[in-house]
Image: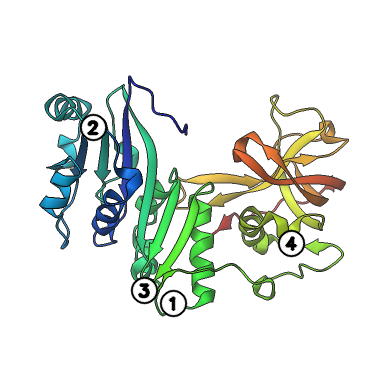
């Protein structure tokens, strides 16, 4: 996602979340901030009406027009083009209806999602994970920022679990947890991990792979210079540099139809000996390097030993 908006495109800021998650409050707060006070008009498309209504005076002050759309079938590229002609906005904000599948959203050719933010009510998160995981996954998948509010009274252990679930569905997002006092500084404690992080070789059991992967992605500095050992499936690509492959595991982040491969690039002198879908046991030292896929620095493995291993039948679940 670029930082500059091209003149010939319409930037769409997509605000996700289920009903009463706090999307309207978040948008009203955002529109009052100095960084929102840019030139031109804003078109706000509201796809569901909650208990909180927008303040008409604030909307007028911020040169924001509101259009309510209560039927997903109306949200066509043709209709969105009509709104652009009528209101002539410089930007569009869409308050999304969490009961609509975001994967089915079709935009005009010159519109693009510039930023995607998901708002989650921490007090009802369990309910939505259990009953609406595919919809939640569609909202989270490409989110740049995930804000979980109303975390008051939720234990650190449960918040850690929530972070892992969100991270599995939204691998590149910034995750913020909030209670009535503001942002919660929260991270997995070393003593909460199911393996000994201070061992000479950190042994990652098959059932703990997902926990290790998420924690290493969130806090790579915790593992930098340490040696890990785990069993994984090989992923190879002609695009990979010589002497590199990705050992990883298939994970179900939302449902059986939404599987993803979780792994880290591994530098190993004999990488060419292995083929995709072959199972190996890897012992490697963890480092941090710039990686294009990370859009910055992230975990990289330096192989110390790689050998064939038996297949693990189970997939990683969160």
Mark 4 or 3, which is nearer the eye?
3
Q: Is residue 285 above or below residue 188?
A: above
Residue tagged 2: 40
The type of colouring in the image is rainbow
> Is residue 292 visible to the viewer in this orientation of the structure?
yes
Q: Closest to the observer: 5 or 296?
A: 5
Vertical position of residue 146 compared to residue 188: above or below: above
Residue wearing tag 3: 180
User: Which label sits in the foreground, 4 or 1?
Assistant: 1
Q: Position of residue 290 (x, y in %)?
A: 69, 39
The Cα atoms of the two marked residues, 3 and 1, are separated by 12 Å
N-terminal of the two: label 4 or label 1?
1
- The residue closer to the viewer here, 67 or 89, is 89
Residue on which disc 1 sits = 154
At horizontal 69% and vertical 76% (from top left) the residue drawn is: 191
Residue 87, quarter of the rendered image: top left
Looking at marks 3 and 1 on the same chain, the residue that comes earlier in the sequence is marked by: 1
Secondary-structure class at tag 1: loop
Whether residue 306 is situated above or below residue 80 in the rendered picture = below
Could you say where residue 277 lies in the image, as x and y percent from the top left?
A: 69, 39
Q: Tell which tag, 1 or 2, sits nearer the viewer.
A: 2
Which-is-in-front pick, marks 2 and 3?
2
C-alpha gap between disc 4 and disc 3:
37 Å
Count neighbours of disc 1 (C-alpha within 10 A) and say few if under 14, some if 14 to 19, many if 20 or more. Answer: few
Q: Is residue 185 left or right of residue 14?
A: right
């Amino acid at each position: 996602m670029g930082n500059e908006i091209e003149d010939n495109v319409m930037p769409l800021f997509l605000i996700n979340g289920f009903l009463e998650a706090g999307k309207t409050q978040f948008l009203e707060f955002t529109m009052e901030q100095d960084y929102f006070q840019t030139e031109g008009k804003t078109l706000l498309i509201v796809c569901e009406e909650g208990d909180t209504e927008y303040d008409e005076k604030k909307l007028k002050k911020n040169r924001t027009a509101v259009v309510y759309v209560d039927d997903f079938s109306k949200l066509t590229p043709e209709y969105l083009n009509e709104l652009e002609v009528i209101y002539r906005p410089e930007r569009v904000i869409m308050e999304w209806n969490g009961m609509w599948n975001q994967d089915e959203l079709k935009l005009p050719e010159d519109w693009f999602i510039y930023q995607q933010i998901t708002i989650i009510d921490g007090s009802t998160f369990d309910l939505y994970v259990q009953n609406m995981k595919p919809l939640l996954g569609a909202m989270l998948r490409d989110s740049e920022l995930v804000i979980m509010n109303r975390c008051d009274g939720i234990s650190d252990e449960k918040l850690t679990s929530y972070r892992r679930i969100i991270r599995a569905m939204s691998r590149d997002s910034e995750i913020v947890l909030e209670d009535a006092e503001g942002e919660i500084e929260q991270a997995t404690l070393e003593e909460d991990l199911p393996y000994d992080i201070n061992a000479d070789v950190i042994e990652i059991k098959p059932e703990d792979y997902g926990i290790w992967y998420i924690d290493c992605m969130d806090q790579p500095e915790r593992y930098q210079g340490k040696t890990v050992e785990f069993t994984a499936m090989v992923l190879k690509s002609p695009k990979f540099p010589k002497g590199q492959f990705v050992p990883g595991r298939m994970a179900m982040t939302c449902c059986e139809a939404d599987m993803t491969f979780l792994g880290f690039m591994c530098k190993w002198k004999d990488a060419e000996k292995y083929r995709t879908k072959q199972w190996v046991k890897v012992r490697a030292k963890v480092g941090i390097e710039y990686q294009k896929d990370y859009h910055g620095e992230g975990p990289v493995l330096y192989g110390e030993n790689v050998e064939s291993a038996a297949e693990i039948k189970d997939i990683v679940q969160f």
